[in-house]
Image (cartoon, rainbow, N blue to C red):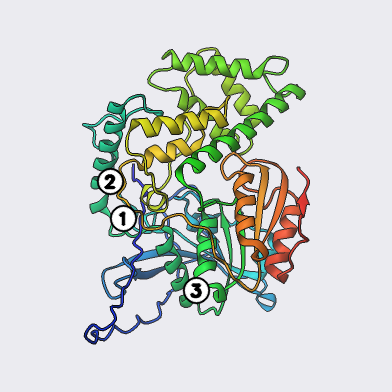
Amino acid sequence: MPVRTLTVGVVALAVLAGSPAPARADPAPAPPTLAWGECHDDSAAVALNDEVECAQLRLPVDWARPHGPTFELSVARRPARESQQRVGTLVFGPGGPGDSGVQRILEGSRFSDELLDRFDVVSFDPRTVERSAEPVCTPDPSLPKPPVPLGSQADFDAMVAYNQAFWERCRPTTPVFDHADTLSTVRDLEALRRALGERQISFHGSSYGTLLGQQYAERYPHRARAVVLEGVFDHSLGVRSFVRTQAATLQDSFDEFVSWCDRSTECVLHGRDVRAVWAEVLARADRGEYAPRTAFDVTAVALGLLAGPRWSDLAVAVRDMEAGSPPPELDLSLSVAAFCADRPVPVRDYTEYARLVREAAAAAPDIRYGGGLLAVQTCLGWPSPVRNPPHVPQVRTRTPLLLLNALHDPRTGYNWATNVAQHLGRHGRLVTYEGWGHGTYKRTDCTRAVVDRYLVDLTLPAPGTRCAAA
């Protein structure tokens, strides 16, 4: 199966005082162009239609070498349906990392009718995702993949070797493997704005796409008309805080699931001690009864289904695992090169790794791990320093960024949204959806109206605005 991987290069230029006159810099590259035409898609999941236009945007592989090798970024657009009332262009930043923005435009269900009427809605497949130089590679079959969590120094060493061998197999299959972190995608987004001929763009980022929104607003504040961050990613955290907060927010969502089971007859575990049943399932995994699946695979079921939230499905899955069925497999993959280039994993040995496992378990006594531990393990052995290291966002846009987050989000936790809002200060405004799950824009009339009024009219909601749970 093709694997999506990203990384990018941030290059610092040093100027030495008193040195000989430098050679003249290369002229800036010509503005990129877009030739819109019919979309061609091999996927049977989405029917193509005449409303959507597609194009390829040729861009530098390495933005530090603007006249060097290039690749093609795949872009899709739905022109505004009411051209006389058109506000401008709204660019959607897909999540993951690894989600396809082109697919979202083809589906056409991501935004309200009002936004589809008033905006040209545009998105793209980021570097190494699907149509944009996706790597075609598989793990080395001679190296078995170590379990999550790792159990020894030997496991730790095997994981590093496994990761590095995999990356070496992926690297030759795409020119952008080492140039695909979010800072490179920021440059891609600015090139897209220029190619669209827009003085400013509006932006709506979802989940990991919110990091793109933050960093675009930081680098190009005068080009960002309005920026929505839905399901806020906090890029300021070190590895320990990252793992701990990911575990804590998954525990919070699990607590909400338990409360629902206690009060709802729709839960197949209603009337039972759900935490005790869950603990027994984990104990079975620890005893090897689901081998080769592990206790982490059990918690991954919760991570996947609580994002909905699909409480009924989770209750059935827990009941079935209690009866002896192995944990169902869920796709929790992410674009390795993008994520690993954005997030350092300064974990030198098993002792430091085991400390992270204990921190996650302390923050999440029922759920144990959280998604952060999987992310850390995925990036063990990545070259240091990373190209886009974490930092506190420094945003100074004319219009404050709009943050929208569920109170009980198992992936981009409310703890992240409040932290980013605090960093942004008067340049950000947080709206709280008092419900559950990952992704909030179309949950209720309130969440939809807050975003639509902001994007169409640049109307900010009042400080402390909250939308009731559906």
Residue labelled with disc 2? 167
Of 266 and 336, nearer the camera is 336
Q: Say what secondary structure mark 1 lies in.
A: loop
Does residue 105 lie above or below 153 as drawn? below
> The residue under label 2 is which amino acid type?
Trp
- SS class, disc 3: helix
Q: Which residue is mark 3?
A: 193
Disc 1 target residue:
177
The crowd level at tag 3 (other Cα within 10 Å; few <14, some 14-19, many 20+) is some
Residue 301 position, x and y percent, is 53, 29
Residue at 62 percent across and 45 percent down: it is 415
Q: Residues within 10 Å of mark 1 (few under 14, many from 20)?
A: many
Say if 114 sits above or below 222 in the image.
Answer: above
Q: Please indicate whether residue 57 sits to the left or right of residue 141 in the image.
A: right
Asked if disc 2 and disc 1 are in contact, CB closer than 8 Å, the reply is: yes
Query: Is residue 260 or residue 240 the one in the foreground?
Result: 240
Left/right placement of residue 259 relative to residue 172 reads: right
Pointer 2 or 1: first along the chain: 2
Earlier sequence position, callout 1 versus callout 3: 1
Q: Residue 309, how many percent across, how many down?
A: 64, 36
Which residue: 65% across, 57% down? 403
Q: Element type at marker 2? A: helix
- Residue type marked 1: Phe
Name the residue rendered at 55%, 40% in the picture: 245
Q: CA distance from mark 1 to mark 3?
A: 23 Å
Mark 2 → mark 1, Cα distance in angstroms: 9 Å
Q: Is residue 12 left or right of residue 437?
A: left
Question: Where residue 284 sits in the image (x, y, percent)?
Answer: 48, 14
The residue under label 3 is which amino acid type?
Answer: Arg
- Looking at the picture, how far across and down is residue 250, in whole percent? 58, 35
**Quarter of the picture holding the C terminus:** top right
